[in-house]
Amino acid sequence: MIGMLALPNNGAAQTGEIIQSILGRPLQSAQVSQAYIHADGSLEGVFNGISFAGTWTLEDGKYCRKFTRGLTGAPICMTVTAEYAPNGAVRAVIFAGPGGRARFVVGQ
């Protein structure tokens, strides 16, 4: 990647810092649009045309989410890493869990 730096996740502090930096900012991937993680512990978005909502927490250095509307599945905890722009801003986040990895571009 040109102009991007990927840093490993070193545990709870970094996961919390990454999540803090993307709160309220739009997240987008090939299948997900209009996704947001909110400071109040809620999340929402659209996955392949299906509107979804849920809750999230930080547990043992991982981002954990549970869907409450639109999508189904067991709650899951994932590691989080970030890709940074040269100015230090988070440009993308990667969530990795038992089901695989998902990369999201972070908007303003």
Image (cartoon, rainbow, N blue to C red):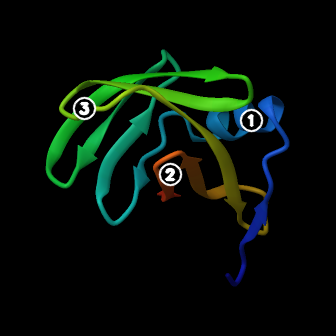
Identify the residue at the far top of this view.
Answer: 40
Classify mark 1: helix, strand or loop.
helix
- On screen, residue 44 versus residue 5, left or right, reads left
Q: Position of residue 33 (x, y in %)?
A: 30, 53
| Label number found at residue 108 | 2
What's the residue at 46%, 49% (across, down)?
99
- Amino acid type at circle 1 is Glu
Classify mark 3: helix, strand or loop.
loop
N-term-proximal mark, 1 vs 2 = 1
One can see residue 67 in this view: yes
Q: Position of residue 68 (x, y in %)?
A: 27, 21
What residue is disc 3 on? 72
- On screen, residue 97 versus residue 79, left or right, reads left
Q: Circles 1 and 3: CB distance less than 8 Å?
A: no
The CA distance from mark 3 to mark 2 is: 28 Å
Please rate how many residues cluster around mark 1, counting C-alpha atoms within 10 Å: few if below 14, some from 14 to 19, many from 20.
few
Q: Which mark is in front, 1 or 2?
A: 1
Occupied quadrant, residue 48: bottom left
Occupied quadrant, residue 16: top right
N-term-proximal mark, 1 vs 3 = 1
Please rate how many residues cluster around mark 2, counting C-alpha atoms within 10 Å: few if below 14, some from 14 to 19, many from 20.
few
- On screen, residue 53 versus residue 63, left or right, reads left
- Amino acid type at circle 2 is Gln
Occupied quadrant, residue 85: bottom right
What's the residue at 63%, 36% (across, down)?
19
The answer to whether 29 is drawn above or below residue 24 in the figure is below
| Label number found at residue 81 | none
Identify the residue at the far bottom of this view.
Answer: 2
Quadrant in which the N terminus is drawn: bottom right
Q: Position of residue 71 (x, y in %)?
A: 23, 35
What residue is disc 1 on? 17
What's the residue at 50%, 51% (across, down)?
108
